Image (spheres, rainbow, N blue to C red):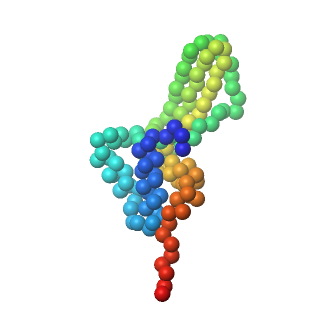
Amino acid sequence: MMDRHLDQLLMCAVYVITKVTKEDKSFQNIMKCYRTQPQANSDVYRNVWRKKSAPNSASSASTKNNSTISSTSPSSNTTTTTTTATSNTTASVEEERGDLIHFYNNVYIKQMRHFALRYSRPPALLW
């Protein structure tokens, strides 16, 4: 969970706790509350970094300190390619971005499910 915006992690944590404690709160409701905060920024929940992957092959270049960033629309399945050339080599990295709900479903819950289930309510005891 490194390199994540703290507000993203907090919203995901609030949502996962509402799920394991069986509270009836939607992710949209949590984001609505976030938007009322003075530090709120729509990029925090609309343009969330999901994963970074290196391309299949790296090419070499003869330029120094050349950077190219290309991206598509900020929809829920955006891919951004960042190319940086330094000292005769080029490193290219693809970043997948999406909204906070996609991040929660595809990244956050996969890593936090086991931890979150520790806080689930025990079944009611019948005496």
Left/right placement of residue 3 relative to residue 43 reads right
Specify the quadrant of the image occupied by residue 62.
top right
Residue 33: percent from left, percent from top: 32, 52
Left/right placement of residue 92 relative to residue 33 reads right
* Image: 109 above or below 119: above
* Image: 8 above or below 57: below
Q: Residue furthest bottom?
A: 127
Residue 16: percent from left, percent from top: 47, 58
Residue 31: percent from left, percent from top: 37, 51
At 45% from the left and 60% from the top, the residue drawn is 17
Specify the quadrant of the image occupied by residue 50.
top right
Foreground of the two, 43 or 115: 115
* Image: 62 above or below 72: above
Residue 105: percent from left, percent from top: 53, 53
Q: Can you see residue 46?
A: no
At 54% from the left and 20% from the top, the residue drawn is 67
At 53% from the left and 50% from the top, the residue drawn is 108
At 46% from the left and 63% from the top, the residue drawn is 19
